[in-house]
Amino acid sequence: MQIAGLLLSFAVGVWAPLPSNPPAPSPPKATTEPKTDAGHDQDQAADNKRPAENSLTRVELLKTPVVQIEPSEKAEKARDYTSSEWWLVYLTAALSVITGYLALFTGKLFRATARAGEDAKCVQRAYIQVNDLDEPIELGEDGSFFGSFRIRNYGNTPARITAISVASFVLHSRADLPPEPPYGSEFEIHVLVAPQDHFVHQRRLEYSANVVEAADTLQSINVMTLTLYIVGYVDYTDNFGVNHRNGFARSYFPPRPQGSGKSYLTFITNQGYNYDTERK
């Protein structure tokens, strides 16, 4: 009986349904509601916006490609400093330098030629100078005397004399000469003087305008209390058409008993009394 009960219990346990967990409830299906036109447009705008955002993100992540350009034949030829084009550049630069030196040399040559021309004029032009004659000057008792002057051309070309002025005046021996010579009247003259030639100009001059005082003046000049001066100038034109003036000034030195007994003229060294200058 016990055995039969065991078998019965075993049979009931095999065939009895095993307990199982109930299945999880599935989520309720969303009910589909009809969408309006506005909602449909919003969904479409959202769909259109999403690819744009994705594309921007993709562009930012892309790396800039490095493009390598192979040097062309012209570029390689331009860097070839031995090519014919570069030789033309070298030749042009050399010609420019040579032209600059030639221009500089031409300028120096022109200036040297101009200076040589001026020097040639200075050498070849006429030079007029007034000299007193070796003849003694005799002062007359009437307050006048007769002066003779040699006008000589020391240049290498002729000189045309156009005017002469000669005057005399008396000053105290200790008095200073005026800053400018007191020239007298000018006499127009036309004389052509050849190179190394001369002509003599004679003029009667006065040392005293008052005949009554002439004796006292003459005595004062002879004892060298007073000094007699002779000043003048000669205007001339050289062979190049340039006008010049030669100024001269002398002082009278009376005869000395212990000397040769002759009077003579001495050269005045004051500035502006003996000169040779151009004039208009």
Image (cartoon, rainbow, N blue to C red):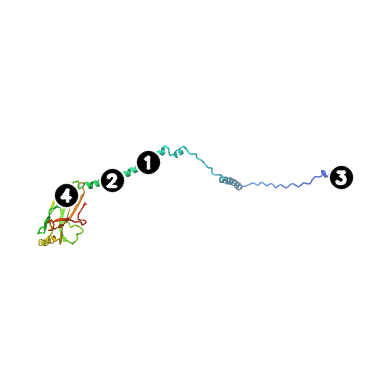
Report the quarter where the N terminus lies: top right
The residues bearing labels 1 and 2 have C-alpha atoms spaced at a distance of: 27 Å
Label 3 packing within 10 angstroms: few (<14), some (14-19), many (20+): few
The residue most toward the front is 258
**Residue 33, percent across and down?**
65, 47
| Disc 1 target residue | 94
Q: Residue at x 22, y 47 (%)?
A: 123
Q: Position of residue 184 (x, y in %)?
A: 16, 56
Count neighbours of disc 1 (C-alpha within 10 A) and say few if under 14, some if 14 to 19, many if 20 or more.
few
Q: Amino acid at mark 1?
A: Ala
* Closer-to-camera residue (264/176): 264
Give whichever of discs 2 and 3 has the lower sequence position.
3
Residue underneath mark 2: 112
Which residue is identified by label 3? 6
Q: Secondary structure at mark 1?
A: helix
Residue at 84 percent of width and 44 percent of height = 10
Q: Amino acid at mark 2?
A: Ala
Closer to the observer: label 2 or label 4? 4
Q: Nearer the viewer, mark 2 or mark 3?
A: 2
| 123 lies left or right of 20 | left
* In the displayed structure image, the side of residue 168 where residue 33 appears, left or right: right
Whole-angstrom CA distance, mark 1 to mark 3, is 131 Å
Per the model, the C-alpha gap separating discs 2 and 3 is 155 Å
- The amino acid at mark 4 is Arg
Tell me if label 2 and label 3 are in contact, CB under 8 Å: no
Q: Which residue is mark 4?
A: 152
Looking at the image, do the residues carrying marks 1 and 3 touch, with CB atoms under 8 Å apart?
no
